[in-house]
Amino acid sequence: MQNLIDAKLLMKVFSKIEQQGEPATTPVGNGFELAGMQVATGFDGYDLYFFADGVSLTLGFHQKYHIDAQSEAQIDAFIQRLKQIDSRS
């Protein structure tokens, strides 16, 4: 499962949400929201947090991530949302 999502895609989507999204309160503090996905950074700037579709994902140092979800369907929806946001202009 760790190889389902490319870390470069996550970083691109994070940047897009940070630049185009609206300020939002996420489960880990202040962040941004765009197209149903919320993002935030850790206090030290090394961790990136993503929340959408019942999934939480943490992208850490060395581009490793941890994903929490109840089902594969939630992960599939989360990945689709990442791709949709990435394809936005």
Image: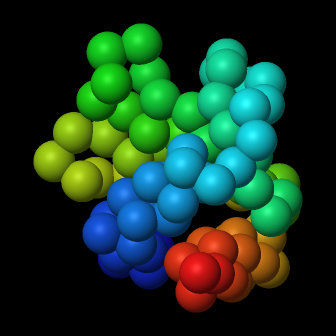
Q: Quadrant of residue 70?
A: bottom right
- Viewer can see residue 2: no
Query: Residue at horizontal 53%, vertical 60%?
Result: 16
In the shown orientation, is residue 88 left or right of residue 47? right
**Quadrant of the drawing holding the N terminus:** bottom left
**Quadrant of the drawing holding the C terminus:** bottom right
Q: Position of residue 48 (x, y in %)?
A: 44, 39
Query: Residue at horizontal 32%, vertical 65%?
Result: 7
Applied colour scheme: rainbow
Q: Position of residue 21 (x, y in %)?
A: 70, 49
Q: Quadrant of residue 73?
A: bottom right
In the shown orientation, is residue 14 left or right of residue 25? left
Q: How many marks?
A: 0
Q: Position of residue 38 (x, y in %)?
A: 71, 45
Residue at far top of view: 43
Residue at far left of view: 62
Query: Residue at horizontal 32%, vertical 15%?
Result: 44
In the shown orientation, is residue 15 left or right of residue 20? left
Q: Position of residue 85 (x, y in %)?
A: 64, 74
Query: Residue at horizontal 74%, vertical 32%?
Result: 23
In the rendered view, would you say 51 is above or below 81? above
**Along the viewing direction, whichever of 25 and 79 lies nearer the viewer:** 25
In the rendered view, would you say 42 is above or below 89? above
- Viewer can see residue 43: yes
Q: Quadrant of residue 43?
A: top left
**Along the viewing direction, whichever of 3 and 46 lies nearer the viewer:** 46
